[in-house]
Image (cartoon, helix red, strand yellow):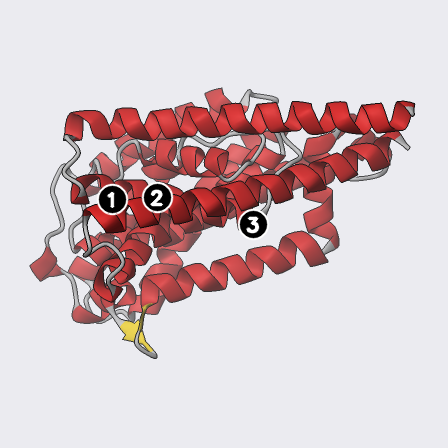
Amino acid sequence: MEKLLKKKNNIQLDQFRELGLLLFIIIISIMVQIRNPSFLTGENINDLLKNTAILSILSVGMMLVLVTRGIDLSIAANMAFSGMLASIIVRDFPQIHPVLIMLIGISAGTLSGFINGLLISKGKILPIIATLGMMYVLRGSTFLISKGQWVSAYQFTDGFKKMATGTNWGINNLILIAVAVYALAYYFINHTRTGRRIYATGSNPDSAKISGINTDRMVILVYSIMGMLSGLTGVLWMARFASAQSDSAMGYEMNVIAACVLGGVSMSGGSGKVGGILLGSLLFGILNNTLPLINVSPFWQNAIQGAVILLAVIANVLAKRGMTKRNLNRRDR
């Protein structure tokens, strides 16, 4: 009975959170449109979606990591390393097909994520410590393989750049890739046994072990998925901006974590939905897009983003307490 009550409470909270996020996005959009009529133009919306695509893809992996009560601080460094590796190959071997280069970047990212998973599951190292260490290893490795040099736009092939800047059916490739990732993630989480086991691992690790779930395997899997998506987005990042630098995407992991928090992913594990992180990523992207449009000072932009994140967390906590209290009162009756 208590488990059913908790599950019902979580469903109600998720629905409340997603509806609240959607309403908040609509309100912000209307307010910005009144202030700047160019906000809801087709061109700006297209730019907004392109700018949010990489963030939203990474949020899928981070959600799975957070669901298992972990965290990954190495994703931006992984992006830089994988992207730099792919960029160097493009520069030195321009005849290689861009898809193969992308697969090399994805493989490098997946390997880094796999090592994170091993350190955390088998080595019993705290996720924040293991991934922090990996972050420095990858940043140093990026500098070593690049020898401190940039790979510039003229050294990229047109095929490589079009992976992120090209279009199909009139839609930018970044947006199409993000849609594909979300479709696969939704199916994986909601319609596969492994997806359910990941959530069980985060909800109650001890019960999951008793029920026969290999929790170590689940942890390795989610960090490998996070690494795979980091490798993918690292290559797309370099292709989009046509520039590979050792410090690319510096600090971007915080944006991803913030998008997940806005989307209602619990930092204590076991809770998070694909729809929530999609809205959270979109809201974070809107804030990045709209604040400059309405001439907010750069000194205030980070403060406003931080305030919105804090308000979202406080609202989630208050909503969860309220729903828990109401359900307990109903049970007592």
Residue at 26% across, 69% down: 96
Q: CA distance from mark 2 to mark 1?
A: 9 Å
Q: Categorize mark 2 by other alpha carbons within 10 Å: few (<14), some (14-19), many (20+).
A: some
Q: Are marks 2 and 1 in contact (CB under 8 Å)?
A: yes
Q: Amino acid at mark 1?
A: Thr
The disc, 3 or 1, on the residue closer to the chain's N-terminal end is: 3
**Is 246 positioned to the left or the right of 205 in the image?**
left
- Identify the residue under disc 1: 290
The disc, 2 or 1, on the residue closer to the chain's N-terminal end is: 2
**Is 23 positioned to the left or the right of 65 in the image?**
left
**Residue 198, located in which quarter of the rendered image?**
top right
**Is 185 positioned to the left or the right of 240 in the image?**
right
**Residue 214, located in which quarter of the rendered image?**
top right
Q: Element at badge 3?
A: helix
Is any part of residue 224 visible from this angle?
no
- Identify the residue under disc 2: 28
Q: Give the foreground label among 2 and 1.
A: 2
**149 vs 155: above or below:** above
Q: Categorize mark 1 by other alpha carbons within 10 Å: few (<14), some (14-19), many (20+).
A: some
Q: Element at badge 1?
A: helix
The disc, 2 or 3, on the residue closer to the chain's N-terminal end is: 2
- Identify the residue under disc 3: 274
Q: Amino acid at mark 2?
A: Ile
| Image quadrant occupied by the N terminus | top right
What x and y, as percent, mark residue 34? 24, 49
Instruction: Report the residue that reaches farthest toward the bottom.
Output: 169
Residue nearest the viewer, comparing 215 with 55: 55
Q: Give the foreground label among 3 and 1.
A: 1
